[in-house]
Amino acid sequence: MWRDVTVSDIERIEAQAGRAEVTLRMDEEAFRGFYDRTARALWLYLRRVSGDAHAADDLLQETYYRFLRAGAAHETEAHRRNALFHIATNLLRDANRRRIARSPQGASGSGGSHDVSDVPEPRDRAGQTEQRTDVNRALSRLKPRERALLWLAYGHGSSHQEIAAALGVGTLSVKPLLFRARRKLAALLSPLGDRR
């Protein structure tokens, strides 16, 4: 699903690029623990918002690389996680801009398929497939920022402060943005949503 990135990998990449050595605020063991605790949730976020498992793999590695390269000191684990998701969100925005610029359809492109086949399913699968397909179709019609908001809030369980930090918006903006994204998703899921 995703490749483990180690501090040694980061140092090797840095040396190959001919840049100055990376100053790390975390030793190898601390980074490994942080990676183990955050990689799956981050990959799922990248996968959900980008709609592409391969892109999520690449973005995951780039996110950890940039996180370590920044060398910032963080007070708590929550601050580290917020910084990590903020970097990932910026990378997603950049990737989306490049995709739109390359796409012959421009901004009207579909944004990829957004299946959740990599997310564990509930034990009771009866009736879930059709519902999941409808949700995936509706999510693919949302803007990447709306998907990110919804995933961080409901898929990841982030607080409004964490969402604000990850997306680079004001904390007071999160509630109305979430409201609009939920309303748009609900409209897309309603029987009349397909006719719009």
Image (cartoon, rainbow, N blue to C red):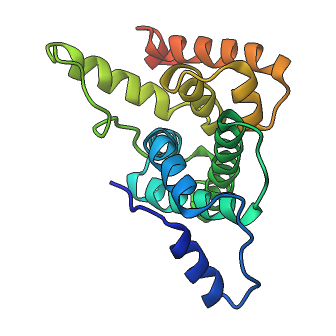
Q: Residue at 76%, 45% (x, y): give it.
A: 74
If the image is split into quadrants, where does the N terminus sit?
Answer: bottom left
| Residue 23 rendering spot, x and y as whole percentages | 75, 70
| Residue 128 rendering spot, x and y as whole percentages | 23, 17
The correct choice, above or below, for 147 with respect to 185 in the image is below
Q: Is residue 96 left or right of residue 83?
A: left
Question: Observer-nearest residue: 110 or 47?
Answer: 47
The correct choice, above or below, for 151 with respect to 75 in the image is above
Count of marks, rendered view: 0
Question: Observer-nearest residue: 10 or 192?
Answer: 10
Q: Tell me where residue 144 sits by quadrant.
A: top right
| Residue 22 rendering spot, x and y as whole percentages | 71, 74
Q: From this viewpoint, which residue is outermost toward the top?
A: 191
| Residue 189 rendering spot, x and y as whole percentages | 44, 14
Question: Observer-nearest residue: 57 or 137?
Answer: 57
Q: Is residue 52 left or right of residue 147?
A: left
Q: Residue at 57%, 24% (x, y): give it.
A: 150
Q: Residue at 18%, 13% (x, y): give it.
A: 127
Q: Tell me where residue 83 sits by quadrant.
A: top right
Q: Is residue 116 left or right of residue 70?
A: left
